[in-house]
Image (cartoon, grey):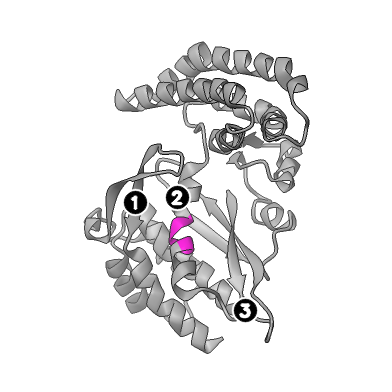
């Protein structure tokens, strides 16, 4: 779960205001896809609390304080994101290079373990056992190290902020070792936001809250196609052909991408991967989704309507 910034141009003569869309991604192996939700641009905690009021399971987030609520909800396990912690230590490299390098080295060790487990197709139980045997000791050493150096910088220094951010989330980070299905970071959710960021560069803003709500619906439906492996063009044809004015709710649910009877993985023409580099010079795989060009047309339509 995460929230993403969208621009709303509903104040004549003034600059765009910031609105937020929330993304909820189903991370199960048989995923139902992703869900974008927009309500007047609110970033308040009432949004995730309402959307997850009946949810039982694991919730993985960054350190935004509204997520603290879920720590006390029965039936919910809260997990943190190591990628966000890593970024904080990257920001501390200039002011405290030695300490930042130590933290980043430990984090790399954790990611190497994950990559080794993935590359050999380890079972969920094997992943759990290996994490408890190899990852937890690294986390324990790192936690003790963070405590030992906390007085070597001011709280407002980049390192101080990194330590504070990481230490508050450490119990949630450790929980990823409790279950082989859990992930070390929340990166799949952030990758799911890339089409919206690309779209924001194309159409710049939504003219109204209603237009942003339409965007959320479009990103939810076509983004879910990409996750579940449904060809979005075929799914759109199927859904529009079978959509009727008075479809009952159970019939509408059958039209969702995750229930599309024509689910196939023949949509490789929609995307390609290329080698890219962060500003720190580190390589990563960047998936460019041509899905966004499909989104562009309906988004233009909704802009003119609203």
Residue at 46% across, 65% down: 219
Q: Which mark is residue 98?
A: none
Q: Residue at x 56, y 33 (%)?
A: 86
**Callout 2 secondary element:** helix
Question: Is residue 256 visible from the viewing direction of this image?
Answer: no
Question: How far is mark 3 from mark 1, CA to CA?
Answer: 29 Å
Marks 1 and 2: CB-CB under 8 Å?
yes
User: Residue 183 appears at what percent x and percent y?
Assistant: 49, 33
At horizontal 34% and vertical 59% (from top left) the residue drawn is 289
**Magenta segment includes 195:** yes
The mark closer to the camera, 2 or 3, is 3
Residue 20 in the image: x percent, y percent? Answer: 63, 63
- Residue 191 shows which numbered tag? 2
- Indicate left or right for 135 with 44 as reference: left
The span picked out in magenta is 193-197
Front in this rendered view, residue 199 or 263: 199
Q: Secondary structure at mark 1?
A: strand
Q: Counting other residues with Cα less than 10 Å from the Cα at mark 1, is it few (<14), some (14-19), or many (20 or more)?
A: some
In the picture, the quarter occupied by the C terminus is bottom right
What residue is at 62 percent from the left and 79 percent from the top?
9
Determine whether label 2 and label 3 are within 8 Å by CB.
Answer: no
**Which residue position is annotated with label 3?**
9
Residue bearing the label numbered 1: 287
Q: CA distance from mark 2 to mark 3?
A: 25 Å
Horizontal arrangement in the rendering, residue 215 relative to residue 40 (left or right): left
Which badge, 3 or 1, is on the more N-terminal residue?
A: 3
Q: Is residue 27 above or below residue 124?
A: below
């Amino acid at each position: 779960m995460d929230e993403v910034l969208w621009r709303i141009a509903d104040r004549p003569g003034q600059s765009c205001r910031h609105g937020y869309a929330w993304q909820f991604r189903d991370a199960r192996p048989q995923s139902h896809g992703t869900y974008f939700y927009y309500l007047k641009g609110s970033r308040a905690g009432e949004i995730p609390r309402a959307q997850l009021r009946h949810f039982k399971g694991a919730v993985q987030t960054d350190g935004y304080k509204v997520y603290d609520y879920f720590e006390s909800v029965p039936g919910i396990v809260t997990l943190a994101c190591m990628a966000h912690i890593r970024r904080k230590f990257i920001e501390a490299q200039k002011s405290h290079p030695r300490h930042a390098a130590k933290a980043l080295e430990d984090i790399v060790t954790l990611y190497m373990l994950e990559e080794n487990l993935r590359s050999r197709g380890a079972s969920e139980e094997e992943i759990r056992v290996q994490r408890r045997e190899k990852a937890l000791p690294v986390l324990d050493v790192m936690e003790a190290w963070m405590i030992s150096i906390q007085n070597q910088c001011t709280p407002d220094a980049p390192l101080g902020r990194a330590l504070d951010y990481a230490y508050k989330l450490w119990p949630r980070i450790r929980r990823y070792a409790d279950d082989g299905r859990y992930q070390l970071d929340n990166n799949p959710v952030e990758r799911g936001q890339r089409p919206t960021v690309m779209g924001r560069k194309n159409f710049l803003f939504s003219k109204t809250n209603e237009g942003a709500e339409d965007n959320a619906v479009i990103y939810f439906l076509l983004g879910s196609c990409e996750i579940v492996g449904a060809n979005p063009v075929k799914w759109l044809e199927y859904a529009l052909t079978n959509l009727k004015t008075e479809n009952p709710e159970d019939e509408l649910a059958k039209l969702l991408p995750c229930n599309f009877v024509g689910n196939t993985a023949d949509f490789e023409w929609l995307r390609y991967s290329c080698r890219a580099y962060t500003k720190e010079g580190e390589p990563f795989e960047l998936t460019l989704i041509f899905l966004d060009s499909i989104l562009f047309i309906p988004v233009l339509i909704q802009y003119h309507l609203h």
